[in-house]
Image (cartoon, helix red, strand yellow):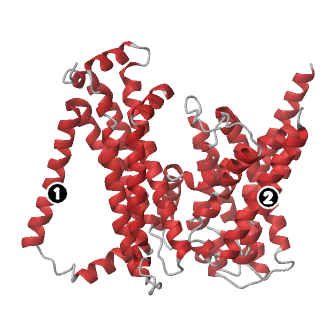
Amino acid sequence: MKNKGIEWLRVIIFTAIANAIGLAYVYLLDDMINKNSFFIMFAPTTAHILTRLITREKFDTEELMLHAHLKGNIKYYLYSIPFVLLSNLISLILIIAVYIDNYKLSDCLNSDTITDLLIIVFLGIGISFTAFFICFGEEFGWRAYLTPKLEKLVPEPLALVISGIIWGMWHAPVIKSAGLNFGTGYKFFPYAGYIAMSIFAIFIGSFLTWLTKKTGSVYPASICHNLIDSLNLYGLLLPQKFIEKTYQPGQLSFNSGVVSMSSGAVMGAVFFVILCIESSKKRKSSKI
Amino acid sequence: MRGLIYKDFLVNKWNFLMCFLTECFMSFLLFAPYIDADEPAIDSSLSAMFGILSFSSIFFINGGFEMNIFLSDESKKWAYFVTSTPMRAEYQVQSKYWLIAIMSTLCMVLCGFFDALNCCITNDAVSVSALILLLFYIQIIVRSLEIPFIVRFGTNFGSYFKIAVFALVGFGALVYLLFGDLSHFGSMDDFWEWAIDFFSGDSKTLAVIITTLPYVSSVMFYLSYKISCRLYLKGAEHFEK
């Protein structure tokens, strides 16, 4: 590939801008992250646009992945629903299996009745599809710019790992300051949180990349990301709520966060393998 | 299809620009409490009150501009031409629906942006993002009801229909305010307190409404599109040459 150097430079500039905005947001506007995360979600989009402008890269319509490509792809738009619901359900079962001796089931759920639970699920799905733009802010950076760029530079599995680590580490300021997903005060805080988040990001990122590749559009990934976030915030079981209800700064919050996120990571790992197989097939056929 | 949307975008570019500028201007209403530099500290209820007023007016204005996009294509020549092409009437109507959905979404993004900006300015500000979502869904539902009338009878009749509906609702509200039981509203302060709690708090009623509306509005929007497709050619007969 020609101009590998400039492509690496673009990746570095993009990562630097996205992280700088994230850091500035968390440290300059204290407590903002708990109140309104609108701007921080658009940091990768801003980084995408600025990197293209700085490095004088064309705004190619196909590369931007802004076309919805709805025809024949509706199923990919809907795949996020079973994926997220199933991973939440498995997480719930895991939480019950691991913690139910010490805690009541109601401590793990973010709702007191089945009606509340249904409201949460349907609310999450409804909002994810109509207000997809919230996570579009992230996906337009990670899936429409960083991952395709890395795929041009390194083999696909490595590209997924690197983009997952960058995505995971982008959450580092929030993990440290607000205890995102894993709480605070656990062993090796916050580094253990960074590692866990990066692993989660690699595998969940694989599913989101798979959706993006199948449709050639960034919207299905935005919807899926929105659904993951909204069900984690309001939802079914939800590590964050579980942590809040049984909150003790320490190992428990970290463990429960890891247990509840592991199902999504395992399901995402399947798509990581699928993408690796597809890319090796493509490489073989291109050699022939 | 993309071509039709692009055509509409070009034809209505001044309409969009005016819409954007007016909405940005209205958004500054949010920041009105900060104008008095001597007293920069504002309480959360005042901020929420301005948020409710500002975002409601933005969506109202956006609705008006959305309906203007039908005006540009109200000619028999265009209607028969587009129907004779492989795109047919369905694509012509669909492009309008897409444009309205895009405009409403952009309006929601703009409101979300200003809501977040308001929260960044002061820690006392209250986010009314639930209200923004609610207004977006209501906007889609109102458009779903209105568009088939516009397609069938033209923009003028459509706007008469809208005025008639608003007048009817307004008249109903007036009758209720004159003769109805207002005790549970209490004073104006009580009303605002209720509105602020409702839109910025964890109200279960609001949660149920916001849960239902995405599905209701999506179904209504789709049905409205289907009805409009059927009515398009009948409506074209009323257009001028």
- The residue type indicated by label 1 comes to Val
Quadrant in the rendering for residue B89 = top left
Q: Is residue A52 above or below residue A214?
A: below
Element assignment for label 2: helix
Residue B237, image x and y in percent? 20, 20
Q: Residue at the location (36% across, 50% down)?
A: B62
- Residue B157's disc is none
Residue lying at the far front in this picture: please name it: B37
- Residue A231 appearing in the image: no
- Labels 1 and 2 share a subunit: no
- Residue B15 appearing in the image: yes
Q: Is B133 on the left or on the right of B181, as rendered?
A: right
Residue B97, image x and y in percent? 39, 36
Q: Is residue A77 above or below residue A181?
A: above
Quadrant in the rendering for residue A79 = top right
Q: Residue at the location (49% across, 55% down)?
A: B109
Q: Is residue A135 above or below residue A101?
A: above
Label 1: which residue?
B169
Quadrant in the rendering for residue A180 = bottom right
Q: Residue at the location (57% across, 36% down)?
A: A68
Residue A188, image x and y in percent? 87, 77
Residue lying at the far top in this picture: please name it: B84
Give the Cα separation between the discs numbered 1 and 2.
54 Å
Mark whose residue sits in front, 1 or 2: 2
Looking at the rendering, in which quadrant would you find the C terminus of chain A?
A: top right
Element assignment for label 1: helix
Return the residue nearer the eye: B212 or B109: B109
Label 2: which residue?
A16
Q: Circles 1 and 2: CB distance less than 8 Å?
A: no
Q: Residues within 10 Å of mark 2 (few under 14, many from 20)?
A: some
- The residue type indicated by label 2 comes to Ala
